[in-house]
Image: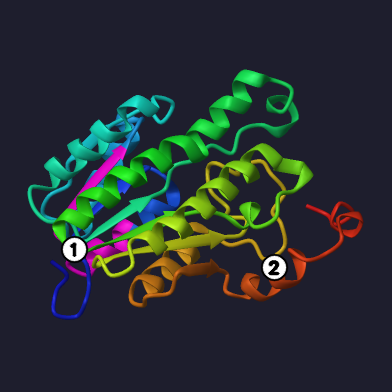
């Protein structure tokens, strides 16, 4: 259960080796979150992330391996993560996705399918299992890492943006379905984040780093806000951007 100050004592992170997830976990563990379950596909990076969590103050940091291309195993992955937590789970963070290589991927039907599977289909399946488990538990919070790329899809990364648009919409709908259950769903919409995934790409305006996004997530979980933007200014910018005529939208840089 959350402590007396409302801070989570146990967390599961799907995509636990991502730069943003690691920054969030360091903050949670430093605020006395004792159990951190890290799930992902890279054993070496997960092991490093688990050591970071323990060094930051966690008491238990088990690792669960999964492949986000294998949708049929999403339910089992979620079950394994909850079992590894060895008790009630206060917070589940879903930080799964693949930016891909737009110049080549959009010409490859298999890669397009991979991007949609990893960015939307697998997380949606996992979220369904997570929601069912937390509903039965009677409490909990789910934080889903979406992106402003899903608010309005751009030509430059339309496969990735489409996957995030699907995940974003699914998560908002899931939040509505869980009203009154004791389970809260929050969607995080970062802008361009300087991480290993975006290394080599030209930063977009209002770009941030993993630490800034982590700070926004921590502030967000202290509230019941359905959507968390990072940086917050993007909320107002995209109120305009999402309504621009397509003829103007396509001429914007980025």
Cα separation, mark 1 vs mark 2, equals 34 Å
Q: Quadrant of the N terminus?
A: bottom left
Verify whether residue 67 appears in magenta. no
Tell me the residue at 35%/70% (across/down): 221
- Where in the figure is residue 188, as x and y percent of width and height? 48, 61
- Where in the figure is residue 205, as x and y percent of width and height? 72, 62
Tell me the residue at 70%/41% (across/down): 158
Report the span colored magenta: 25-39
Could you say which is closer to the camera, residue 252 or residue 153? 153
Q: Which residue is mark 1?
A: 33
Which is nearer the N-term, disc 1 or disc 2? 1
The correct choice, above or below, for 89 with respect to 126 in the image is below
Camera-nearest label, 1 or 2: 2
- Where in the figure is residue 44, as x and y percent of width and height? 31, 31
Residue 24 occupies quadrant = bottom left
Could you say which is closer to the camera, residue 49 or residue 231? 231
161 vs 37, left or right, is: right
The correct choice, above or below, for 80 with respect to 175 in the image is above
**Residue 16 in view here:** no
Tell me the residue at 41%/66% (across/down): 217
216 vs 181, left or right, is: right
Q: Which residue is mark 2?
A: 238
**Residue 168 in view here:** yes
Tell me the residue at 29%/39% (across/down): 39
Verify whether residue 26 appears in magenta. yes
Could you say which is closer to the camera, residue 146 or residue 230? 146
145 vs 237, left or right, is: left
Q: In terms of secondary structure, where does tag 1 sit?
A: loop
Residue 186 occupies quadrant = bottom left
Q: In terms of secondary structure, where does tag 2 sit?
A: helix
133 vs 149, left or right, is: left
């Amino acid at each position: 259960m959350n402590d007396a100050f409302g801070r989570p004592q146990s967390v599961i992170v799907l995509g636990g080796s991502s730069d943003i997830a690691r920054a969030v976990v360091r903050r949670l563990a430093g605020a006395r979150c004792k159990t951190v379950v890290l799930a992902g596909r890279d054993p070496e990076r997960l092991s490093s992330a688990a050591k970071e969590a323990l060094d930051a103050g966690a008491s238990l940091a088990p690792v669960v391996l999964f492949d986000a291309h294998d949708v049929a195993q999403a339910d089992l992955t979620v079950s394994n993560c909850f079992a590894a937590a060895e008790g009630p789970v206060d917070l589940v963070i879903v930080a799964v996705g693949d930016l891909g290589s737009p110049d080549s991927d959009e010409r490859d039907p298999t890669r397009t399918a991979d991007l949609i599977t990893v960015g939307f289909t697998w997380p949606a399946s996992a979220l369904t299992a997570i929601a069912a488990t937390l509903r039965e538990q009677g409490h909990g919070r789910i934080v889903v890492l979406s992106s402003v790329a899903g608010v309005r899809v751009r030509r430059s990364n339309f496969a990735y943006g489409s996957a995030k648009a699907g995940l974003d919409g699914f998560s908002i709908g899931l939040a509505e379905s869980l009203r009154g259950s004791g389970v809260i769903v929050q969607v995080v919409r970062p802008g361009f984040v300087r991480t290993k995934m975006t290394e080599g790409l030209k930063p977009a305006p209002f770009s941030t780093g993993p630490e800034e996004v982590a700070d926004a997530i921590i502030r967000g979980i202290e509230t019941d806000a359905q959507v968390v933007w990072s940086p917050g200014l993007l909320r107002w910018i995209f109120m305009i951007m999402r309504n621009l005529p397509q003829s103007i939208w396509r001429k914007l840089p980025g």
